[in-house]
Image (cartoon, rainbow, N blue to C red):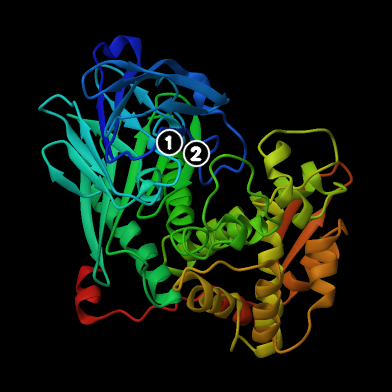
Amino acid sequence: MHYQISVSDPQSHFLNITYTIPEISSDYIEIQLPAWRPGRYEIQNFAKNIQFIEAISEANEKLPLHKVTKDRWRVGTAGQKEVRIRYSYYAISQNAGTSYVDEELWYLNFINFCMYTEGRITEPYTIKLGLPDSYQIACGLPETGKNTLYANDFYQLVDSPLLASETLQQCDYRVRGVQFKIWMHGNLRPNWRRIERDFRRFSREQIATMGEFPETEYHFLNLILPTAFYHGVEHQNSTMIVLGPDDEGEGLYSDLLGVSSHELFHTWNIIRIRPIELLPYDFTKENYFRTCFVAEGCTTYYGDLFLKRSGVFTDEAYIKELQVYMKRHFETAGQATQSLADSSFDLWLDGYEKGIPNRKVSVYHKGALAALILDLYIRKKTNHAQSLDDVMRLLWLRFGKPFIGYTLEDYIQIAEEVAGETLEWYWHDCIYTSEPLETRLNDALAFVGLQMSTFSNGNIQLNVLDDFKAKIQRDKWLETVQVLTAEEEEEE
């Protein structure tokens, strides 16, 4: 399969795309454009951005082309060995899951506009980009020639976003044999020395915790906007992050650290440790699953925890982030009637909208608090000999590394195996029902000398208790797991 992508008029924001399908042996084929993208569990109907489409033979003659669903077409191919699908796509949006082109930038999420041929989704793809000669490419796909990329199959293609411009900035670092690249596009002057130091620290801490990294290289793709923005999406060996405003202040840097650590942990948790309902992805319809509180909640919890363990965050900075999760849950959804499991399922319905009052909870915020409760409970019971770290490592070894998909029951079994007991109270109070979390959360926090207070006006505050024994437990909870080599000590 081959794609040729060009932009004849950057001001129009249209991509000109030719999709070449070789080795045809049937009277017709059906081509499918995805209706949603990994990392965003809602139907997005990318086909609405296609302005024009036609099917052409090798002799440059038009072939019958009929739409059979909102994003699927049937092409009459009788007697044809090769067909070209030519179409235009409007690339005007700048968030972490869209595409955008202008005079200075190509930002492409191939999931938005690339199609696959029914029955041939696992075949390889070559992508030729009609870029200006001065442009540099940032992408997780390997380059096989000038402005030419290669994907092993459609799944890899659409899980590999791209930035290209002549003003890309970058820095590289290596951790435990993995090559990391940080790319920036925007009006800013990055402090690369600080960025490299902090990214190296949290990357090393994550790999030390999980034991190994799924990829040999990884790309942080950053689009920095002049306006306020915060959005990141995980991918196979990269993440696409859109942040703003580009004032180069501490707020921007804190956002960069937080979202980058979160998205890096997704390389294990959802990219490879994937719910069985999403393996493989069905891009034509909703892929319902009840474990997004694991995929997003545990990742949200660990994203900031790794920043603390690695020394990027101070204790005070980390506790401030915990308070943010608590405020976002209790001040907006503390009385919600849905459980975490049900809100995971309903992401496909309205998970990314505000929704009606007191209905759903956030798989990110309540999910992170549920992860914290489980982690601290296991740590208290085992005196830190076991923790949520062990749960995540077992998920990786049993399901992520072999890439076979896990069920909610698998997660329950592993958590109870690590805890050494049944956890019926946890599944009932934190996952399966809408029981208020305050009591369970404060029971867990007391072990590490923290307490959440709720005021009469509904505001939430996280307090540090003056308890020496609890501080020792807090230090054990937040201590690093990595052991530096001599070379890493020299880098520090």
Q: Please tell me in which quadrant of the rendered image residue 103 appears.
A: top left
Q: What is the secondary structure assignment of the residue under circle 1? A: strand
Q: Could you say which is closer to the camera, residue 470 or residue 245? A: 245
Location of residue 451 in the rendering, given as x and y in whole percent from the top left corner: 75, 65
**Residue placed under numbered mark 2 in the picture:** 231
* Quadrant for the N terminus in the image: top left
Residue 158 visible to an observer of this rendering = yes
Q: Is residue 314 left or right of residue 342?
A: left
Mark 2 vs 1: CB contact within 8 A: yes
Give amino acid for label 1.
Answer: Val
Residue 242 marker? 1
Q: Is residue 286 left or right of residue 109?
A: right
- Dot 2 or dot 1, earlier in sequence: 2
- Residue at 27% in and 64% down: 216
Location of residue 435 in the rendering, given as x and y in whole percent from the top left corner: 88, 59
Give amino acid for label 2.
Answer: His
* Position of 122 relative to 394 (above/below): above
Location of residue 60 in the rendering, given as x and y in whole percent from the top left corner: 23, 17
Location of residue 402 in the rendering, given as x and y in whole percent from the top left corner: 45, 73
Residue 442 marker? none
Disc 2 from disc 1: Cα separation: 5 Å
Q: Is residue 214 left or right of residue 419?
A: left
* Position of 396 relative to 184 (above/below): below
Residue 448 visible to an observer of this rendering = no
How many other residues sit within 10 Å of disc 2, few (<14), some (14-19) or many (≥20)? some
* Quadrant for the C terminus in the image: bottom left
Q: Could you say which is closer to the camera, residue 301 or residue 57? A: 57
Q: What is the secondary structure assignment of the residue under circle 2? A: strand
How many other residues sit within 10 Å of disc 1, few (<14), some (14-19) or many (≥20)? many
